[in-house]
Image: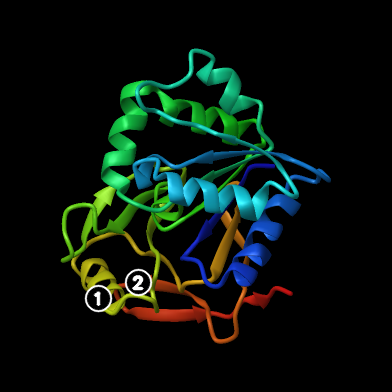
Amino acid sequence: MRHIVGLGGGGTDEQIDLLFGYVLGLTGKDRPRLLLVPTASAEEEEFIAWFLERTAPRAEVTVLRTFPWPPADLRDVVLAQDAIFVSGGSTANMLALWRVHGIDTLMREAWEQGVVLSGWSAGMICWFEHGITDSFGPQLEAMECLGFLPGSACPHYDGEEKRRPRYTELVRGGLPAGIAADDGVGVHFVDTELVEVVACREGAAAHRVTPDGEDVIHPRLLG
């Protein structure tokens, strides 16, 4: 089966550990091979160090860097994983780099082979046909993404005050309907169908957003 888990955003370290545990659990491995792809964060060293601290005790973690260039064995690195996690940051910049180096194609190949794809913020919306992003400024705009999953997506739905009104405005204006996730929420797709919503904190949820409004999807609380 093909798995994608999009995370609307994080939380405390303890809450994030629950989300990471959920993603890694989908691999079925006691100590899975996990690839961190921090392109959207400009490969920020502080974030990479934090991520390794949270995940290295339970996964064999590799970091995929694109600066100054990707590794010569890029395809082997990507396809050798059990799970892939994509950081937050600039979705537009990330996808531009991925397309230049063929990483977008390798992500689809990995997904087709059963590698669990995941990530938050930019790492959530990138898998959909469209996402709402601050890549072009704080006003938030829609952009085309990879299109593995149908429709559109919005992270940080309860974490950033502009997200809900702007996303609903864009959907009413013609952006394909989609799914929004609060911080601390994971939306789990098998193939292209939403099969479960999970959360690491009370009160968080996902939402189906259409031109007619939104419907809340109550999650299963982790922990």
Query: Badge 1 is on which residue?
Result: 162
Bin the neighbour count of mark 1 within 10 Å (Cα to Cα): few under 14, some 14-19, many 20 and up: some
Please give left or right for residue 138 compared with residue 31 in the image.
left
Q: Which mark is residue 97?
A: none
Q: In the image, is residue 68 above or below residue 61?
A: above
Q: Amino acid at mark 1?
A: Lys
The quarter of the picture where the N terminus appears is: top right
- Mark 2 secondary-structure assignment: strand
Residue 75 drawn at (x, y percent): 54, 19
The quarter of the picture where the C terminus appears is: bottom right
Q: Sequence order check: which comes first, mark 1 or mark 2?
A: 1
The reply to whether residue 190 is visible in this rendering is no
Query: Badge 2 is on which residue?
Result: 210
| Color theme of the render | rainbow
Q: In the image, is residue 38 above or below residue 207?
A: above
The residue nearer to you, when weighing 189 against 221, is 221
Q: Residue at x 65, y 30 (%)?
A: 113
- Mark 1 secondary-structure assignment: loop
Q: Residue at x 35, y 64 (%)?
A: 177
Quote the CA–CA distance across marks 1 and 2.
17 Å
Residue found at the very far bottom of the displayed protein = 203
Q: Residue at x 39, y 70 (%)?
A: 156
Residue 151 drawn at (x, y percent): 39, 55
Q: Residue at x 17, y 53 (%)?
A: 136
The residue nearer to you, when weighing 20 against 146, is 20
Q: Amino acid at mark 2?
A: Thr
